[in-house]
Image: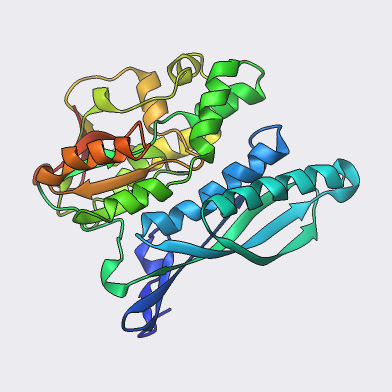
Amino acid sequence: MTHPNLLVGIERVDDAGVYKIRDDLALVQSVDFFTPIVDDPYAFGQVAAANALSDVYAMGGTPVTALNLVAFPINELGRDILKDTLRGGLDKLREADVVLVGGHSIEDKEFKYGLAVTGLIHPDAILANVGARVGDRIILTKPLGTGLINTALKGGLASAEAVEKAMEVMAALNRKAAETMAKVNVHACTDVTGFGLLGHMSEMLGNDDIGIKVYSDSIPILPGAVDYAQMGLVPGGTHRNREFYRPRIRSEHELPPYMFDILFDPQTSGGLLISTAPGDAQPLVETLREAGVQDATIIAEVVAEPKGCLLLV
């Protein structure tokens, strides 16, 4: 669909849609929901809300309102679980200074929760997932491994330490990262979610006029994720991501199979991937860490060759 005020639509495969309402203001709109990934309903609500808000932050926008989306088996699970989930989501919205304006619920056999989020942005400040320039450095703001740890948790094999850290990361807003990156000249941004790190980084290649060199040894990884990958506790989405994006991957040396499982691991409420000029990259990392984004790390460099692929080094 095309419209003169539609600045970012479905044809862009970006994190959110953007609709201009006047020359100096546009709406950023996104929606996300999923089934529970943890047993604690309050924690699930927090993670689901942080995840839904993330797409607006990734576009450079400021989320302002949200609508709850609920599918719930009321007769099987009871009202308390639903109340705790919604309370977790509401508390996270309050932390983000986002107003809950309503929502919609249906009775369903499988519990699902998420939000539709609306944000604001200046049309000239939109950050797309394409636009990275040769020489840019790419910063990742959260460690990888949430999909692996959630899979281990479902199998009763995840350690308490690994689960606690993963929950902390998934429930953390990308607000500080978005506000901090707005202070420098960012050329492209996206967040790492269901396609995994290499999947979302592949989307940053755009029309294949650039390549990205990935520093595989520099990528922050959650405690326990390597162990669970080596044990084969891999979510199904990892295999789909690998199958779809593997043709765009090159490697200067052979990586162990478990490392690919981490790099293709579907993330829930993952970090931002920020592409910025080389002179701004390290100062931005330091500023992010001072702001509390402790895992912010330069993990890649945009290169002229080889075009259209990710080169793992």
Q: Is residue 300 above or below residue 63?
A: above
Between 290 and 23, which is closer to the camera in this rendering?
A: 290
Can you see residue 235?
no
Can you see residue 113?
yes
Residue at left offset 28%, top offset 56%: 182
Residue at left offset 67%, top offset 59%: 69
Q: Is residue 147 above or below residue 73?
A: above
Residue 17 coordinates in the image, percent (x, y): 43, 68
Q: Quadrant of the image for the C terminus?
A: top left
Residue 183 coordinates in the image, percent (x, y): 24, 54
Give the left or right position of residue 256, taking residue 173 as reference: left
Give the left or right position of residue 98, taking residue 84 as reference: left
Give the left or right position of residue 45, taking residue 206 as reference: right
Name of the residue lying farthest toward the right = 75
Residue 302 coordinates in the image, percent (x, y): 15, 44
Name of the residue lying farthest toward the front = 290
Residue at left offset 43%, top offset 24%: 222
Residue 192 coordinates in the image, percent (x, y): 40, 43
Between 276 and 213, which is closer to the camera in this rendering?
A: 276
Q: Is residue 312 above or below residue 74?
A: above
Q: Is residue 50 above or below residue 9?
A: above
Between 12 and 81, which is closer to the camera in this rendering?
A: 81
- Total residue callouts: 0
Residue at left offset 65%, top offset 20%: 155
